[in-house]
Image: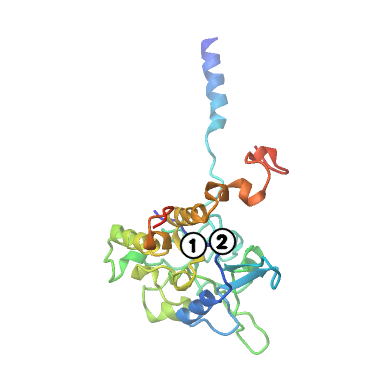
Amino acid sequence: MARMKFICDAERCIECNGCATACKNEHEVPWGVNRRRLVTINDGVPGERSISVACMHCTDAPCMAVCPVDCFYRTEDSIVLHDKDLCIGCGYCFYACPFGAPQFPQAGAFGLRGKMDKCTFCAGGPEENHSVEEFRKYGRNRIAEGKLPACAEMCSTKALIAGDSAVIAKIYKTRVTTRGNGEALWGWKMAYGGSEKVSDNLGGKA
Amino acid sequence: MRTIAIAAAALALAACHEIPQDAVKPYAGKEDTKAYAGDTFKGDKMAYEKALDQRAQFQNDYAATREAGKSK
């Protein structure tokens, strides 16, 4: 059983917004709703880094934990989806999500909050696959066509990769170890500095 | 004495099993159709998983151009 995830390679992302555009186009996402967006750190400064952020389809999803109407579910492939017919637009999931993934379209003239919308990993929602209703509420169901999310497949530098976590982690590791510094570019030391041993580092747990 | 030792060991080991950390949250919404249930895969889960795996490999540009880690 697959566990679907995204990885964004900050070394490759060129902040082209191709992923966000592909997502908007694929699902005809309304104005004001951004299922995917780019976050840039140290913008304009040498060494700036960008990553593409959307719902990360958490294994222990906080949105799912806080939802008062229990409208979230997880598919066989660990994709976190929700039922819009049940959603009351309370916004708890937005507060709980560490990635700011849940989006709320304006549903009226007075800033009334509509039903939550978020990245579906291009897997639609609880409607019949490829039905008009599914497209209207959740967007296109590419997964049911044997395709991966449009954002990752459209990524020109292949910074954003999507798929089964075991498969994409392997792809990413191959990439990192081939960049020139071999195994040194993988693991704790590269990510956090200091010793390879977790227990030797500040705040590290043995 | 032996019985007490066995009982004590059993009691001590009882704490070693893994307690599920995440309680199963009920889902109150509509049942979703399986991704492989449509016309494309006609319920064939294996074919569906294979298709996604193959598709994921297209993202590996090292595999597409040359064998990873080796220069031409």
Report the number of numbered marks: 2
Residue A136: percent from left, percent from top: 45, 81
What amino acid is at disc 2? Answer: Met
Residue A197: percent from left, percent from top: 63, 38
Q: Residue at x 34, y 59 (%)?
A: B49
Classify A183 as above or below B40. above
* Subunit of label 1: A
Q: Quadrant of residue A110?
A: bottom right
Can I make out residue A192 in this image? yes
Q: Quadrant of residue A140?
A: bottom left
Q: Quadrant of the C terminus of chain A?
A: top right
Tell me the residue that label 1 is attached to: A73
Classify B43 as above or below A154. above
Q: Secondary structure at mark 2?
A: helix
Can I make out residue B28 in this image? no
Tell me the residue that label 2 is attached to: A64
Residue A18: percent from left, percent from top: 52, 77
* Subunit of label 2: A
What amino acid is at disc 1? Answer: Tyr
Q: CA distance from mark 2 to mark 1?
A: 7 Å
Q: Point out which mark residue B56 bears.
A: none
User: Is A196 in front, or is B39?
Assistant: A196
Callout 2: few (<14), some (14-19), or many (20+) C-alpha neighbours within 10 Å?
many
Q: Quadrant of residue B66?
A: bottom left
Q: Earlier in the sequence, mark 2 or mark 1?
A: 2
Q: Residue at x 66, y 50 (%)?
A: A192
